């Protein structure tokens, strides 16, 4: 069973992911149809970043996964037997 701390951390990750998804969806899907001088544009970065930031995040994620895999493989290798 999950402890109270686990549940709080899990729920905060879910809420953070939901907020991030909503922000990005509004930024990419809705904002292009809003006038450039509308006050809503103040809350969002320029549109170029809507492609750059997920690309950088994907590269960092792949690097972390690769490093984790390399560490696990390196630690699990068994030394060769010497006869």
Image (tube, helix red, strand yellow):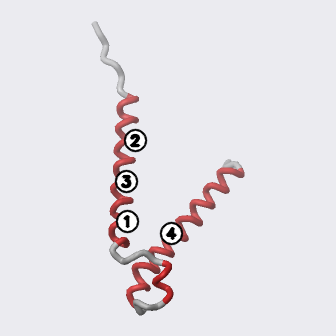
Task: Name the secondary structure under disc 3.
Answer: helix
User: Residue at the spot x=42%, y=75% of the render?
Assistant: 45
* Res 60 label: 3
Q: Which residue is mark 4?
A: 20
**Image coordinates for residue 36, horizontal then vertical, percent:** 40, 89
- Say above or below: 53 vs 74: below
Label 1 or label 4, whichever comes before in sequence order: 4
Horizontally, residue 52 falls left or right of residue 39, namely: left
User: Residue at the spot x=38%, y=59% of the render?
Assistant: 57
User: Number of labelled discs?
Assistant: 4
**Image coordinates for residue 21, horizontal then vertical, percent:** 49, 71
* Residue at mark 2 to residue at mark 3: CA–CA distance: 12 Å
* Residue at mark 1 to residue at mark 3: CA–CA distance: 11 Å
User: Residue at the spot x=35%, y=31% of the render?
Assistant: 74
Label 2 or label 3, whichever comes before in sequence order: 3
User: Residue at the spot x=45%, y=74% of the render?
Assistant: 24
Label 3 or label 4, whichever comes before in sequence order: 4
Label 2 or label 1, whichever comes before in sequence order: 1
- Say above or below: 46 vs 14: below
Q: Nearer the viewer, mark 1 or mark 4?
A: 1
* Residue at mark 2 to residue at mark 1: CA–CA distance: 22 Å
* Residue at mark 3 to residue at mark 4: CA–CA distance: 17 Å
Horizontally, residue 42 falls left or right of residue 62, namely: right
Observer able to see residue 34:
no
Q: Nearer the viewer, mark 2 or mark 3?
A: 3
Please tell me which residue lies in front, 49 or 16. Answer: 49
* Res 53 label: 1
Answer few, some or many: residues within 10 Å of disc 4's Cα (few below 14, many 20 plus, some between 14 and 19).
Answer: few
Task: Name the secondary structure under disc 1.
Answer: helix
């Amino acid at each position: 069973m999950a402890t109270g701390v686990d549940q709080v951390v899990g729920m905060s990750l879910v809420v953070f992911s939901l907020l991030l998804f909503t922000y990005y969806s509004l930024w990419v899907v809705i904002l292009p149809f809003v006038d450039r001088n509308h006050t809503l544009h103040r809350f969002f970065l320029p549109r170029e970043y809507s492609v750059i930031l997920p690309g950088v995040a994907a590269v960092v994620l792949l690097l972390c996964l690769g490093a984790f895999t390399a560490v696990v493989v390196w630690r699990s290798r068994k030394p060769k037997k010497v006869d």
